Image (spheres, rainbow, N blue to C red):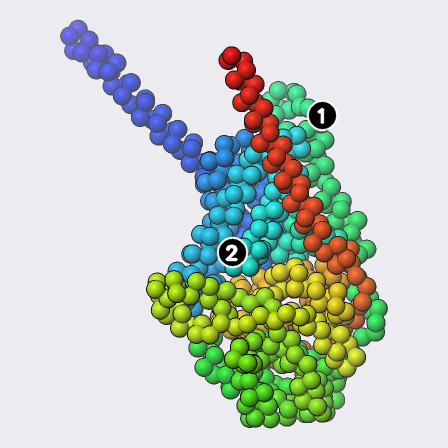
Amino acid sequence: MTVTATSVGESDQLEPRIAPGARTWARRLVRLVPAAAAALSGLLLYVSFPPRTLWWLALPAFAVLGWVLRGRGWKAALGLGYLFGLGFLLPLLVWTGVEVGPGPWLALVAIEALFVAAVGAGIAAVSKLPGWPVWAAAVWIAGEAARARAPFNGFPWGKIAFGQADGVFLPLAAVGGTPVLGFAVVLCGFGLYEVVRLAVRWRRTGEVRRAAAAMGVLSLAVPVMGAVAARPLVSDTAEDGHATVAVIQGNVPRAGLDFNSQRRAVLDYHARETERLAAEVEAGKVARPDFVLWPENSSDIDPFANPDARTVIDTAAKSIGAPISVGGVVERDGKLYNEQILWDPAKGPVDTYDKRQIQPFGEYLPLRSLIGAINENWTAMVRQDFSRGTKPGVFTMDGAKVGLVTCYEAAFDWTVRSEVTDGAQLISVPSNNATFDRSEMTYQQLAMSRVRAVEHSRTVTVPVTSGVSAIIMPDGRITQKTGMFVADSLVQKVPLRSSQTPATRLGILPEIALVLVAAGGLGWAVGAVGAGLRGRRDGDA
């Protein structure tokens, strides 16, 4: 009996010690679920981006984010939003550290994820309002608007719209540009979560408010119906005839930052590929182009200051017998410019366009003294800052109006639109991706150009030094493209168009409207919290 009593007593004493520990671990695991879900849903959003064609994964990604954030306090929502941002941006922007190491990549992601964290807090705040998916989607677009403008003139890479080049929502780009396209995708994702949430609630309780159910269904259905209704805005019909365009990809001696030390070789490669194409034209194998497009940095030797570079370009232009848009680095009055030069085979250089949206830490170095104190190698990479252009660039090439959007500029709404409103019938996006090796960067940028084609209903050409170069129809289809790190050329008869889509005409107005919707929702949410606090104080009194 003594043994039994002792055993029972020991059992009574041991059980409460084990149970609280188990409950503590269970609580900790439960607390980790939202954090893990936030990070994994961000990763899911990344997977929806090019080069993959899994655009639809953006919907469950935002559905999970809605589940994670709905009803949270602002502090928890900040952290969960930051984890979502890290899950999304860490893999999306890994290419930024290909040649310069992980430091700049991690710093960029850490800063950009702060915007997503703030958006997470905003979504949590409006998640208690009637029709919350609408307010929450508008808050997301407001966050994208902020990211596109600050710091250092913004970094819009990773806009939701840029992951939808293969998706059913793409026609909405012609309605209101990237803000409306992105808003529709995010709204549909939050609507998906709301429908699932209400369905589960109805199954458990048999009760669901009709208004909430209707709003959930509409949040899911309206974006899809809107995309279907916008299809007539997407057309590749020629309005101003056709032009036969040649896109030259000369390739580079080697990938990486040191390709810049082979500037003459890069110029020679592009001239050689142009002359090879000219020989095929003379042999009747390829149609004669009306004009030729070279990529950014195809002549990093200033042809205005170096007679040998001028001779190489002039010879190439005469051989093909057509004007060439040459990407050069030009020094003028002691200032450097990333410049497109219109080179006529008879007259030589006749027009120029200076890049307006230059890349921080690539073409100019903000906070130079501070960064130099941290790492002198970074300041050595950008010894002299480039200067900004001030005017849109539309070249008249054999009668066609060609708008120039140089590389990084394609990520910014205003730079592309300004060329179209200035009369461009076709858009060219000359780029240099050689510094990013074979990373996903070139495919992400190509997807941007496809969205821009639909947004403004223009043919878009993408001449790149090392690939992927492409020709894109006004409906977003890629009709020709090159491989990477090969010398190649693309020749095609493409439609010229001059009509303007609603997105072109409206410009920034849709984005302003969505930012105001977000501000209204946040104001309502803050007011509701304040009213609740005052009500509790009055009750206590």
Residue at 59%, 66% in the rendered image: 357
Residue at the left extreme? 2
Viewed as shown, does residue 314 lie left or right of 89?
A: right
Give the number of callouts: 2
Residue at 43%, 62% in the rendered image: 367
The residue that disc 1 covers is 210
The residue that disc 2 covers is 151
Q: Secondary structure at mark 2?
A: loop
Q: Residues within 10 Å of mark 1 (few under 14, many from 20)?
A: few
In the rendered image, residue 506, in percent from the top left (x then y), is placed at 75, 54
What kind of residue is marked 2? Pro
Q: Secondary structure at mark 1?
A: helix
In the rendered image, residue 380, in percent from the top left (x then y), is placed at 40, 73
Between residue 37 and residue 112, name the one nearer to us: 112
Residue at the top extreme? 1
Residue 256 visible, this orientation = no
In the rendered image, residue 398, in percent from the top left (x then y), is placed at 77, 82
Point out the tag, 1 or 2, that comes first from the N-terminus. Answer: 2
Viewed as shown, does residue 12 lie left or right of 248?
A: left
Between residue 196 and residue 162, name the one nearer to us: 162
Residue at 43%, 74% in the rendered image: 383
Q: Residues within 10 Å of mark 2 (few under 14, many from 20)?
A: few
Toward which corner of the image does residue 25 lie, by quadrant? top left
What kind of residue is marked 1? Arg
Residue at 51%, 87% in the rendered image: 264
In the rendered image, residue 179, in percent from the top left (x then y), is placed at 66, 51
